[in-house]
Amino acid sequence: MATVEVTFSPLPAHVRTARLVATAVARRSGVDEALLDEVRLAVGEACSRAVEAHRRHCPAEPVKIEMSDQGERFVVVVSDHAPTSTPSPASPSPAGANGRDAGRLIRGADDAGMPSGFGLAVISGLADDVRVSSTSSGVSVRMSWPSAVATA
Amino acid sequence: MDLKLGHYNKDGIEVVDVEGEIDVYTAPRLRELLIDLVNKNNYQLVVNMEKVEFLDSTGLGVLVGGLKRVRAHDGSLDLVCTQERILKIFRITGLTKVFGIHNTVDEAIAAKKSEK
């Protein structure tokens, strides 16, 4: 059962609100302070991706974010309802510290931003548990972090 | 907080001060400023990110876009950043190999001068 569920219109201005809510709920769930920046950034990336997909395909539909405390994990699921927003298989893998993909990323970037899938690559680099599910009705990004209940 | 932008010229190098959050909502303003500076023939840029509180992939895209623009004119775009939480996203994406990243604006300017 979701601890907190938020739906918002697919507007870039609301992504910041989603980040703030997710960070607050993560803190409340006992996620270590050192991980909160990662939660904030990863949730922001997932919401930005969903907002972009909705703006292209279904601007009237809201984006949904569910946050829950599941045992020793804080789980966030960001779902969109854009039918053709399947992440590109050509998405860059997490570049890692060696920067081997950096040149490709730069060549692929244009004034509209980084190549499709870049945000998901960033999420993969931030959360140790990420699952992306694509269905005909949209894409769902599930991320989780340890909640520090045991150290309380 | 919202995004605050400012810029000034020092020793022939345009320094862009960025303060606040660079995300999908605010990044277009930074993009417009960088494009405007390049259109006004400023090809040696330093972006001071010491007061940036948040940076996501949209912001990275804007910085990379700016870098491509100045490189097209044989220029360069360096960054000033010492904040670990901001540097982390550059490391994750491998972009630490692409941008010159310095501790202070003076250090960035000195590095650019030595390249000339």
Image: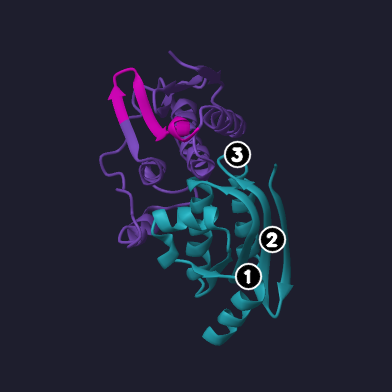
Chain colours: A purple, B cyan
Residue A61 image position (x, y, % from top left): 49, 17
Residue at image point 37% right, 53% down: A108
Q: Chain of mark 2?
A: B
Q: Which residue is mark 3?
A: B25
| Bounds of the magenta segment | A132-152
- Left or right placement of residue B38 versus residue A42 in this view: right
Mark 2: secondary structure? strand
Viewer-nearest of discs 1 and 3: 3
Residue B39 vertical placement versus A130 (above, below): below
Type of the residue with mark 1? Asn
Q: Give how far apart the Cα atoms at labels 2 and 3 are.
A: 18 Å
Is residue A121 on the magenta stretch? no
What secondary structure is marked by label 1? Answer: loop
Q: Looking at the image, which residue is at 39% across and 23% down?
A: A71
Residue A139 located within the stretch drawn in magenta: yes
Q: Is residue B116 visible?
A: no
Q: How many other residues sit within 10 Å of disc 3, few (<14), some (14-19) or many (≥20)?
A: some
Determine whether label 2 and label 3 are within 8 Å by CB: no
Q: Which residue is mark 2?
A: B17
Determine the residue positioned at 70% across, 80% down.
Answer: B11
Distance from the alpha carbon under mark 1 to that under mark 3: 27 Å
Position in image of residue A32 (x %, y %) = 50, 39
Q: Residue at x 56, y 28 (%)?
A: A28
Along the horizontal axis of the image, is A139 left or right of A76? left
Quarter of the rendering occupied by the N terminus of chain A = top left
Which amino acid, by three-letter code, is at mark 3?
Tyr
Pointer 1: what residue?
B41
Q: Chain of mark 3?
A: B
Same subunit, labels 1 and 3: the answer reads yes
Distance between the alpha carbons at the discs numbered 2 and 1: 18 Å
